[in-house]
């Protein structure tokens, strides 16, 4: 099984993970590693774009690299309330944003030994996902446009617990660059090197806040997952594909209420989530927290009720089995589905500029 180490969203060097309760011996520290993984993990997904050079009209579709975290925060499976205040609204100017400069500024603030596992990347990706995941295909509301999580009541939704810190961290970038919309800033913060990115998201006002309950609840099963993801426009296969992001990261009791990683290599993007889901016996964890499961052998890995529903449901399980056997297929399909997620609610014509960013050495 090939593996790809995820440590930062932008920089070209990765550090060994900090020691923690889940610093498993199987994680081999590395000093340097390229993060230009798109050719393997995110193959080109064609839309109406055919660019080959930087900042050119057209271009292959924007595939926003998930960094370490759509994911590190449980792919949006949160339901414990933690009221937050939205960031102040800075109105964009008519000046054309210098996206490369903004990209570099985001890269400069990513590493932080005092935050989580040493990087803001995972929570930035979670922020982008929770904005996109509010989309409703029937009402055409929510999605990557709007950045309405800046306002209450959306900022107070239990699913968005812990994201106030991410919004506040990016506020310093926004103040330096008022010309970029919050919507584009949040999306750009979830991006990575040598990945095409398309701007054009517009901010909205508090009146456009989406209702609570549009993001998945990890305590529920397959019927709930279908209700949530069908509303966005995803099918059963795509639901299973997005769940595979749980190969990365861990849950945090102070954010989702849950605790622990899904795999023994939570900084590597692999098909390990599916293999662990099928290959281990899962028992309910005995603790005072919300219902979750741990592997019977070690008790160090965990699964959520929504995760287990993927192998309990007859329609979901074949997709789990397929991706457990074929990592390359998982990478290919994940690229397309994650791109679709990040474009939800964003009107496109096919004539937008596509940006390819230079990485910082």
Image: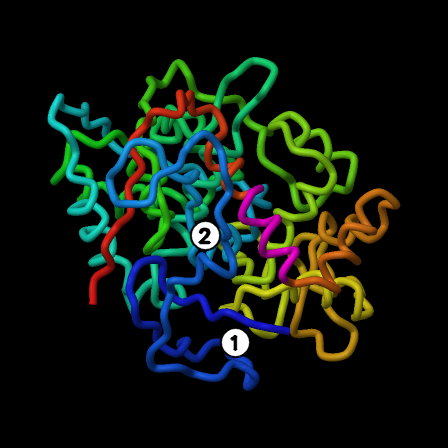
Which residue is under mark 1? Answer: 21
- Assign a secondary structure to mark 2: loop
Report the quarter where the C terminus lies.
Answer: bottom left
Counting every numbered tag in the picture gives 2
Mark 1–mark 2 Cα distance, whole angstroms, equals 24 Å
Please state the horizontal and vertical placement of residue 226, each as a whole percent of the image: 73, 33
- Assign a secondary structure to mark 1: loop
Task: Give the quadrant of residue 194.
Answer: bottom left
Magenta span contains residue 331: yes
Magenta span contains residue 145: no
Q: Toward the viewer: 351 or 22?
A: 351
Please state the horizontal and vertical placement of residue 103, each as a whole percent of the image: 23, 48
Q: Residues within 10 Å of mark 1 (few under 14, many from 20)?
A: few
Q: Toward the viewer: 284 or 198?
A: 198
Report the quarter where the N terminus lies.
Answer: bottom right
Which residue is under mark 2? Answer: 66
Looking at the image, residue 13 sits to the left or right of residue 66; the answer is: left
Residue at 72 percent of width and 48 percent of height: 306
Residue at 60 percent of width and 29 percent of height: 213
Q: Residues within 10 Å of mark 2 (few under 14, many from 20)?
A: many
Looking at the image, residue 348 sits to the left or right of residue 211; the answer is: left
Does the residue at mark 1 contact the one at mark 2 (Cβ under 8 Å)?
Answer: no
Please state the horizontal and vertical placement of residue 110, each as a whole percent of the image: 28, 59
Residue at 26 percent of width and 48 percent of height: 169
- Extent of the magenta region: 328-337
What is the chief secondary structure element of the magenta stretch?
A: helix
């Amino acid at each position: 099984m090939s593996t790809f180490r995820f440590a930062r969203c932008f920089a070209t060097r990765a550090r060994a993970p900090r020691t923690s309760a889940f610093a498993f011996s199987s994680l081999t520290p590395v000093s340097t590693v390229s993060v230009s993984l798109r050719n393997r993990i995110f193959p080109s997904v064609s839309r109406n774009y055919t660019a080959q050079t930087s900042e050119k009209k057209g271009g292959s579709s924007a595939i926003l690299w998930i960094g370490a975290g759509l994911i590190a925060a449980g792919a949006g499976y949160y339901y414990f309330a933690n009221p937050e205040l939205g960031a102040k609204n800075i109105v964009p100017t008519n000046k054309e944003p210098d996206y490369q400069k903004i990209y570099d500024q985001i890269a400069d603030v990513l590493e932080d030994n005092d935050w989580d596992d040493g990087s803001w990347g995972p929570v930035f990706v979670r922020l982008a996902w929770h904005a996109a995941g509010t989309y409703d295909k029937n009402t055409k509301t929510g999605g990557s446009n709007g950045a309405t999580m800046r306002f209450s009541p959306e900022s107070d939704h239990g699913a968005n617990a812990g994201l106030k810190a991410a919004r506040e961290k990016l506020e310093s970038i926004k103040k330096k660059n008022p010309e970029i919309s919050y919507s584009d800033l949040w999306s750009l913060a979830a991006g990575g090197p040598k990945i095409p990115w398309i701007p054009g998201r517009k901010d909205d006002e508090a009146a456009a806040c989406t209702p609570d309950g549009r993001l998945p609840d990890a305590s529920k099963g397959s019927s709930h997952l279908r209700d949530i993801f069908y509303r966005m426009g995803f099918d059963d296969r795509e639901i299973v594909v997005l769940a595979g992001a749980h190969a990365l990261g861990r849950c945090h009791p102070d954010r989702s209420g849950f605790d622990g990683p899904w795999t023994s290599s939570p900084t590597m993007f692999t098909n390990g989530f599916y293999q662990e889901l099928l290959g281990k016996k899962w028992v309910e964890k005995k603790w005072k927290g919300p219902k979750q499961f741990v592997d019977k052998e070690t008790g160090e890995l965990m699964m959520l009720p929504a995760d287990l529903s993927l192998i309990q449901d007859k329609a979901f399980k074949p997709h789990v089995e397929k991706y457990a056997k074929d990592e390359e297929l998982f990478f290919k399909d994940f690229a397309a589905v994650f791109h679709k997620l990040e474009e939800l609610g964003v009107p496109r014509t096919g004539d937008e500029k596509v940006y390819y960013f230079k990485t910082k050495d």
